[in-house]
Image (cartoon, helix red, strand yellow):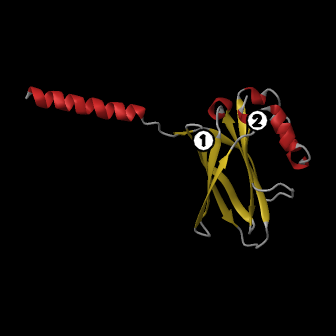
């Protein structure tokens, strides 16, 4: 009886310690800053985190359609907030563009993006900006995009490694 109790105690301890060592991805809170379903811009498919006001000004430069956001995304905003900016080029018009979830898994972000196409077969660029806490993206080195398009029954996975300065603050 004593051996069974000791064995059960050891087994429970091992299971507890294994679960304690296992890192699980955590879902991040975010709000949607803006969704643009059709933009005229020379920008390619882009996914990036903007964590400083200087980075925002650099991205926004030459994009007059974003000037309305200058009052909101000012220097004070970037004291404790960051932006995840996603631009996509689609073979059809975009009827819906939404970031559904953002997860942090160690030093990587996992972003789920839902895109629904319209009826027009014309190449279309769309942009969505998610607003996050700056502490949630500190130290991020890579991210994975899961882009779903239920009309085409396709799931795109795109792994991107980040080496740019926004993560070195």
Q: Quadrant of residue 71?
A: top right
Q: Which residue position holds label 1?
A: 108
Q: Quadrant of residue 75?
A: top right
Labelled pair 2, 1 in contact (Cβ < 8 Å): no
| Other-residue count near label 1 (Cα within 10 Å), few / some / many at <14 / 14–19 / ≥20 | many
Q: Is residue 152 above or below residue 61?
A: below
Quadrant location of the N terminus?
A: top left
Q: Secondary structure at mark 1?
A: strand
Q: CA distance from mark 2 to mark 1?
A: 16 Å
Q: Pinpoint residue 44: horizontal percent, then vertical percent.
A: 80, 56
Residue that appears at 86% across and 58% down: 40
Residue that appears at 71% across and 27% down: 80
Q: Is residue 121 above or below residue 111?
A: below
N-terminal of the pair, mark 2 or mark 1, is 1
Depth check, front residue: 27 or 14: 14
Depth check, front residue: 13 or 154: 13
Quadrant location of the C terminus?
A: top right
Q: Pinpoint residue 51: horizontal percent, then vertical percent.
A: 74, 34
Q: Pinpoint residue 45: horizontal percent, then vertical percent.
A: 75, 56
| Other-residue count near label 2 (Cα within 10 Å), few / some / many at <14 / 14–19 / ≥20 | few
Q: Secondary structure at mark 2?
A: helix
Q: Which residue position holds label 2?
A: 165
* Residue 111 horizontal side relative to residue 6, left or right: right
Residue that appears at 76% across and 57% down: 126
Count of labels in the image: 2
């Amino acid at each position: 009886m004593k051996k069974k109790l000791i064995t059960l105690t050891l087994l429970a301890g091992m299971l507890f310690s294994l679960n304690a060592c296992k890192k699980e991805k955590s879902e991040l809170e975010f709000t949607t800053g803006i969704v643009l379903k059709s933009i005229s811009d020379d920008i390619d498919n882009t996914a990036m985190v903007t964590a400083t006001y200087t980075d925002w000004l650099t991205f926004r430069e030459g994009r007059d359609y974003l000037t309305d956001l200058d009052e909101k995304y000012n220097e004070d905003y970037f004291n404790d907030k960051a932006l995840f900016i996603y631009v996509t080029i689609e073979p059809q018009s975009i009827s819906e563009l939404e970031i559904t979830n953002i997860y942090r898994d160690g030093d990587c972000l996992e972003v789920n993006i839902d895109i629904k196409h319209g009826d027009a077969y014309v190449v279309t660029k769309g942009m969505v900006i998610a607003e996050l806490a700056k502490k949630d993206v500190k130290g991020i080195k890579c991210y994975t995009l899961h882009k779903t398009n239920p009309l085409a029954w396709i799931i795109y996975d795109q792994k991107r490694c980040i080496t740019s300065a926004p993560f070195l603050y």
